[in-house]
Amino acid sequence: MKMKNFKVELLFVALGLLISLIFVFNPMPFWMAAFVFVAQPMFLFAIVSSLIRIYKDLKQKGVI
């Protein structure tokens, strides 16, 4: 598996990080809501999706 297959996960992490940084430097209610309801689920999706892809790749190669 190549890293170019992780484009969606990379995009979600980048957007989540952008929202998080904006919230840190400009703590307004809108950015807090965006952080809680958008950024954190984006991080969760990226982590879970990456772990599933890695598990499938290792299983396919017979490592697991």
Image (spheres, helix red, strand yellow):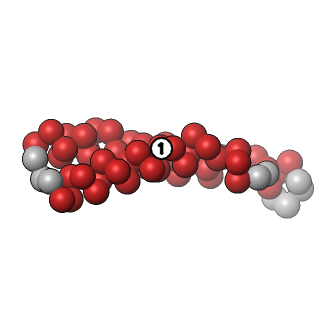
Quadrant housing residue 63: bottom right
How crowded is the residue under tag 1: few (<14 C-alpha within 10 Å), some, or many (20+)?
A: many
Residue 10 vs residue 57: left or right? left
Q: Position of residue 26 (x, y in %)?
A: 14, 53
Which residue corresponds to the image point at 45% horizontal and 50% vertical from the top-left?
A: 14
| Location of the C terminus (image quadrant) | bottom right
Residue 33 lies, with reference to residue 64, above or below; the image says above
Q: Residue furthest right?
A: 62
Residue 11 lies, with reference to residue 27, above or below; the image says above
Residue type at mark 1?
A: Phe
Q: Residue furthest left?
A: 28
Q: Is residue 49 visible?
A: no
Which residue corresponds to the image point at 18% horizontal and 59% vertical from the top-left?
A: 25
Q: Nearer the viewer, residue 61 or 15?
A: 15
Q: Position of residue 36 (x, y in %)?
A: 25, 44
Which residue corresponds to the image point at 12% horizontal and 53% vertical from the top-left?
A: 27
Which residue position is annotated with label 1? Answer: 12
Helix or strand or loop: what does disc 1 sit on?
helix
Q: Position of residue 23 (x, y in %)?
A: 21, 52
